[in-house]
Amino acid sequence: MLSPHFSLKEFTDSAKAKALKIDNSLPDALRSNAVHTCQQLEKIRAILGNNPLIITSGWRSPALNRAIQGSPRSDHCTARAVDIRCPKFGTARSVARALVASNVEFDQLILESPTLPGAWVHIGFRKGANRRQVLTKFAGDKTYYAGVK
Ligand SMILES: [Zn+2]
């Protein structure tokens, strides 16, 4: 376990990596980042009524990140960001609103594809110097809009 509710398996699990036979195991050097991220996720989980959080994407190895055409500077590649859903709490938009309204620290929160049923929240954490930046990104639109839209 990386924290009481989050396992290394769910932090590194990727259907895409499996399909492409990409090794997505977490390097030892990034384990402390992963632990810190999951400790922050415990706070997020509590804010969301202690409902189960689903990590839809956690750590991404460089090969996996290339395969999904992720940003080369993505915080997923340093184990400092995750994509989450919390269906028992509500939609991705309601999750984003609840986190923004709370006093929880995060570096960046992005509400992703809120008009699609598979919408998710990207959230990243730094060890200190968190910017608490909030953005919305719609499917099929390259613009990042400020705030929860
Ligand atoms: Zn993400």
Image: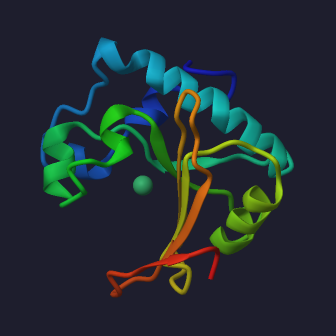
Residue located at (30% from left, 50% from top): 15
Residue 62: where, in percent of width, then height? 17, 39
Q: In the image shown, does 27 or 13 lie closer to the viewer?
A: 27
Check the image and tell me how it is coloured: rainbow
Q: Nearer the viewer, residue 124 or 9?
A: 124
Left or right of 79, for residue 41: right
The image position of residue 135, as x and y in percent, is 54, 69
Residue 136, relative to residue 78: is it above or below? below
Q: Position of residue 55 (x, y in %)?
A: 52, 47
Asked whether, in this view, residue 2 is left or right of residue 137, the answer is right
Is residue 117 in sight in this rendering? yes
39 lies left or right of 45: left
The image quadrant of residue 144 is bottom left
- Decide: is 6 above or below 83: above
For the N terminus, which image quadrant? Answer: top right
Q: Nearer the viewer, residue 122 or 19?
A: 122
